[in-house]
Image: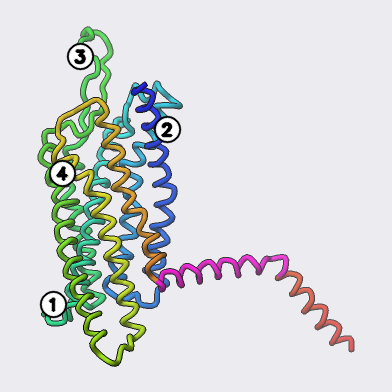
Amino acid sequence: MIHDVAETFYLLSGIYSLILIIIGTPANLICFYIFSRLVPNRNNPTIIVFSYLGLIEVIIPFTWNMNYAVREILWRFLSPQSFRTHGNLEQTSIIVCKLISYFAYFSLQCSAWLKTVAILARCILLHHQCKLRNRLNRADTAKQISLTIIILLLFINIPVFVFNGKRYPSNKNSSVNASQTYEVKCYASNFFSIYEIVHLMLYNCLPTTIMIICNILIARKVHESHNRLKCTKNRHISKRSLKRGLLTKSLVFINILFILLTAPSALFYIFIRHKFKYRNLLTMSLSNLATTSHVLSFVIYLITSTDFRDALSRTRHRKNSRKTFTPEKTTNSIQKCTSLKDANEVN
């Protein structure tokens, strides 16, 4: 009974991983395109970070979630022989093992730190007395910081690519004359017992701590601003200030979503280190939950940002207007113009 329930949950987790890939890829690509090309305030530092964030979060579902989808849908239920042979997509070859693990660690850490930098910069910009305010309010500074984070984390995760993935003999008890077969094992190196702690610090602990502090400071500053507006007779709020407020709201919600959905996996890895029967199922479920925070950014932008909604509606309107101008209609209009011209010449 318990085994059947577990098998059902394995399948559901695999399907959910596939849904994250199918929905997350176009959603994050749209976010990148809108923030980098369409929104009017593209030089805003927060918008610049959002554009880089959209591009990085495209990678995330194609790492461990792709492994879960292939393993639980294609192999466990449709091809049991492949499941018995490999177990994971990462075990098909050393290069696949290295690429999936490298880009998984890199993209998750990069996404977390881009969100952290965005909320930290927003917090500093709201505090007018801070000396760094003018420097952080420049588009060039936002680009430099974002690229520095990306390049730095690419280098930090190089050891993952180097040390992960080893080939071990799969028939140790076979005779000497028998053909030797090998199997690929990922995360088997002693290096990962240390690196998992590093990843936990880079992806969860440090970013979450900074996000919580910044969110508290922003909430306090916004509360003080509302109190000042209540005390003054002139309560007119400029359009620019309103947009800044909506941008801050988007950023705060994204950070809160990240904290809530990634905290369970962090707590699991900190406090539950021992192995048990359905550990893989629980790990997969928590990993899917964490990835959800990187897919739902599109929904938050859509709800909280008027510029994002306007840009998206303009894109849809432009696409629909292109459909109306079909080649057949264009040909008919040209023929009508030609016939009118000929008629005028005859007259």
Do residues under tags 2 and 4 come within 8 Å of each other at their CB atoms? no
- Earlier-in-chain disc, 3 versus 2: 2
Which mark sits nearer the N-terminus, 1 or 4? 1
Q: Mark 2 touching mark 1, by CB under 8 A?
A: no
Q: Amino acid at mark 4?
A: Pro
x%, y% of residue 7? Answer: 38, 27
Q: Which residues are magenta?
A: 306-329
The three-letter amino acid code for the residue at tag 2 is: Ile
Q: Position of residue 253 (x, y in %)?
A: 30, 62
Q: Nearer the viewer, mark 2 or mark 4?
A: 2
The disc placed on residue 159 is 4
Label 3: few (<14), some (14–19) or many (≥20) C-alpha neighbours in 10 Å:
few
- Which residue has dot 2 on it? 73
Q: Disc 2 or 4, which lies upstream in sequence?
A: 2
Q: CA distance from mark 2 to mark 1?
A: 51 Å
Residue 167 drawn at (x, y percent): 22, 27
Which circle, 3 or 2, is nearer the viewer?
2
Q: Which residue is mark 1?
A: 132
Q: Which residue is mark 3?
A: 172
Q: Is residue 100 above or below residue 307?
A: above
Separation of residues labelled 3 and 1 (CA atoms): 62 Å
| Earlier residue among tags 3 and 1 | 1
Q: At 15% across and 44% down in the image, what residue appears?
A: 159
